[in-house]
Image (cartoon, grey):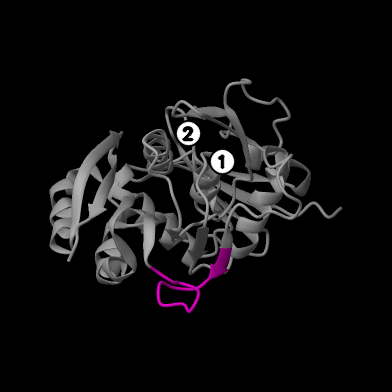
Amino acid sequence: MTDATHLRWKLEVPDPQEEALCAWLEERGSSAFYREADPPRACFAYFPPDQKPPDAAGLAAFPGVRLLEAEAFGDEDWLAKSREGFGAFEVGTRFHVRPLWDAAPGPADRLDLVVNPGLAFGTGGHETTRLCMELLEELAAAGRLKGPVLDIGAGTGILSLAAFLLGGRGLTAFDIDPDCGPAMTELMELNAHLLKGMAAGIRPYESFVGTLDHPQVQGPYAGLLANILLETIQELLPRMAEVAAPGGWLVASGILAERTDEALVSLVSHGFKPEKVLKEGEWIAVLATREPS
């Protein structure tokens, strides 16, 4: 094997800067980006051997972001380095999430989800994903997790899989990012152990790469999931209102806590009545109901 030199940046990133910084790094050749689930919650960005990293001076455009360490390493260390900082953890009352390299299953009373941390957003490690999973648990307990359900900007599809495992059916997940198509398929394959005993060939959810205007979007939906940026939620709310069934629920996240009022006003103005707000760290998730027209 050629001893090609990879580069890893370890960064201190305030929550409000995470999404913008991730986009900036990806535009400049970063092959992966993730944040540690546990304190101090450092962020890591990786650059492949054939990619010149960006000038670190450009980080000054993101208030509070600091480059803590730049580390070069060879091919033989790539796997070990990429696995640092991502361990198993529990979400809500029902889920245990572990990376694919961790062979130890979780507690017997929890659903043992296996994920492959990578570019596609949605491994359960981010606050917004965990908050959405907790709201899905509440919907399931209340008997409200009924289909059809549409997962908007699904990333790896982890929320759709979680909804299915909690009893949801008629799930469809999509994302505009082409990387998410294979990621959704992989997530289902990694969690085949949770689907044993079900009908042969059953798929927890249908998936496609596209937008909310794709022909496969066929409302009305009894539930919508949208763990995306607030700006994107605001842009898509008119279409969400069109495809949501009256009385249907919406779980929305990817919203900074400091913008809670703005998010709630946006939801109300498009016919979604907020029921509950959950907060973790600097992020919130909102459960809302589509009011009759």
Is 6 part of what is drawn in magenta? no
Residue 266: give its label: none
Q: Which of 205 and 33 is in front in this view?
A: 205
Residue displayed at 62% across by 57% down: 183
- Residue 100 vertical placement versus 227 (above, below): above
Left or right? Give the position of 235 relative to 85: left
Q: Which of 176 and 16 is in front in this view?
A: 176
In the image, what residue type sits under mark 2? Ala
Residue 66 appears in the picture as rendered = yes
**Considering only order in the chain, which callout, 1 or 2, is on the residue closer to the N terminus?**
2
**Boundaries of the magenta span:** 207-219
Left or right? Give the position of 228 relative to 104: left
In the image, what residue type sits under mark 1? Leu
Percent across and percent down for residue 129 are: 43, 43
Percent across and percent down for residue 178 are: 57, 69
Percent across and percent down for residue 105 are: 68, 26
Mark 2 highlights which residue?
Answer: 37
Sort mark 2 into few (<14), some (14-19) or many (20+) by Cα contacts within 10 Å. Answer: some
Residue 227 appears in the picture as rendered = no
Residue displayed at 18% across by 61% down: 271
Left or right? Give the position of 44 relative to 224: right
